Amino acid sequence: MSCCNDYSRTELLRNAAAAAGGAIPEPDSRMPVPAGSSLSRRSFLLRSAGVALSVYGATRLELPAIEAAVAEAAAGPPQPVLVSIFLSGGIDPLSVLAPVGDPVYRKLRPTLALGEAEGTGFAEDGRLRWHPAAAGLSTLHSEGKVSVLPGVGYDHPDQSHFNSRHFWEVGALDRQLRTGWMGRYLDRTGTPDNPLQGICFDGRLAPALAAAKVPVATVSGDGRFDLNTPGVWSEMSGWMHDTLASLGARHASSRDAGLRQAGAVTAQATSLVRVLKPFGGKNLVVPPDYPKQDAGNMPRSLSSLAAMIAAGLPIRCVAITGYGGYDTHDDQPADLEKGLKAVSSSLLAFQRDLEARGVADRVLTQVWSEFGRRGEENGSLGTDHGAAGVGFLIGTRVRGTMIGEYPGLDRLDEDGNLRATSDFRGVYCGLLEQWLGTDAGAVIPEAARFARPALLK
């Protein structure tokens, strides 16, 4: 897939910010710094042993704090979990839900238009059909477990990947905000000793989780939640790690500052590994419903997450980047089909996994992308940056209906893009109030401005 310069630059700058674990120079006065770029990062494994988990924004974590938080959460009432799945690049809403019954559709897309009999029909609007690669989402929607936002966005849309993604991440059209919308929720309701309350499976901080007061964490999406010591394996590896844990605990209270720091890091690392090890590596048995190939780390991340939730880990908010890239300026049919099939199949498997584990009523999954694509196809078998896009809410407790009407191709804006029929900030307010049970006004700037759609049954 060939991406535009804005998309490539966005990824490079965000990668640099995540790798630095600190502030980076603002590259352009028009481009915001990603939320959380200034947060300090503490990696809880020695460099020679690899990295299993990193914590951002932690000011003080006592040695037994994480295990104690897990035990406390397991003993307390189950908490709702919000899972955010980001589809990078701006997925095309007119392909995911193709308006085959709209007479303008084939005029705008003589080459890319979906056939009238392809995919499955969308029950709530006879003009729309699901893309064949979205069969997993179509199945869940037929069961009343997917709410569809066919035209989600915001007024006066910004067609820059960097800006629009930032707006979605911080929950406001504000280039200066440095905390994520889920991070601010955790600041309001979280605790100072539980970094697992907000967790990202991409190996780097998700800006939407960037908090100002409480710690949040990242883990490797490939499921390596263990100490990895080169040249040491089998029983010898276990013995060595047990010995390191013992030594770390002894030196964590040393009078020598260097020994105290080294001991604390070692003890914390082994403590974290004890918590996470059952959910990764060879210990994790991925159910057969998950895709086996061409889906990146997404199946393992979701499978690990389902196991963690079922085990009672104190997880509240989760961020995962979905498989694929959707900045489809050219060769859109092949690129979109590959990514959409992997994502849709993974989401169906995740929902089935949660249901089999008996925790599905606790989990709501939100799927979003920074914008949609242009209504008219371009000359390279692709589509250019648009405005309103498509989003989904998945779970046993969602209403399973359409949120906001299909925008229609006869009412495109002056740039030829779909107009938004629902505002993402109103959706966030609804998630905060109806699902997470907190005051949206304390999290989303100007929350009173936005209508809250009914999200739950």
Image (spheres, grey):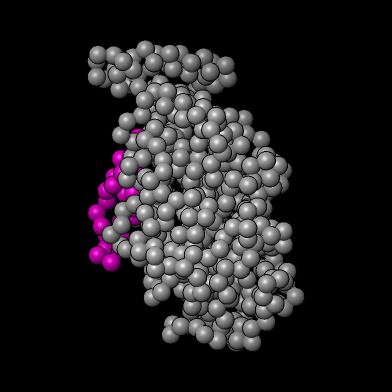
- The answer to which of 286 and 318 lies nearer the viewer is 318
Query: What residue is shown at x 39% (from left), y 13% (from top)?
Result: 247
As displayed, is residue 48 above or below residue 443? above
Does 68 sit left or right of 176 as displayed?
A: right
Q: Is residue 65 left or right of residue 57?
A: right
185 up-or-down from 391: above or below: above
Q: Say whether residue 185 is visible.
A: yes
* Relative horizontal placement of residue 29, taking residue 424 as reference (left or right): left
In reply to whether residue 28 is colored magenta, the answer given is yes
* Segment colored magenta: 14-42
Residue at the spot x=36%, y=40% of the render? 214
Q: Residue at x 29, y 17 (%)?
A: 259
- The C terminus is located in which quarter? bottom right
Query: Quadrant of residue 323 in the image?
Result: bottom right
Number of numbered labels in the structure image: 0
Image quadrant assignment for residue 157? bottom left
- Residue 265 location in percent, x, y? 36, 25
| Residue at the farthest right position | 117
* Magenta part, dominant SS: loop
**Residue at position x 66%, y 35% in the image:** 285
Q: Any magenta on residue 351?
A: no
Left-right relation of 356 to 74: right
Whether residue 339 is visible = no
Residue 7, x across and y down, in percent: 42, 63
In front: 293, or 82? 82
Q: Position of residue 244 (x, y in %)?
A: 43, 16
How far across and how far down the image is residue 101, in percent?
A: 67, 82
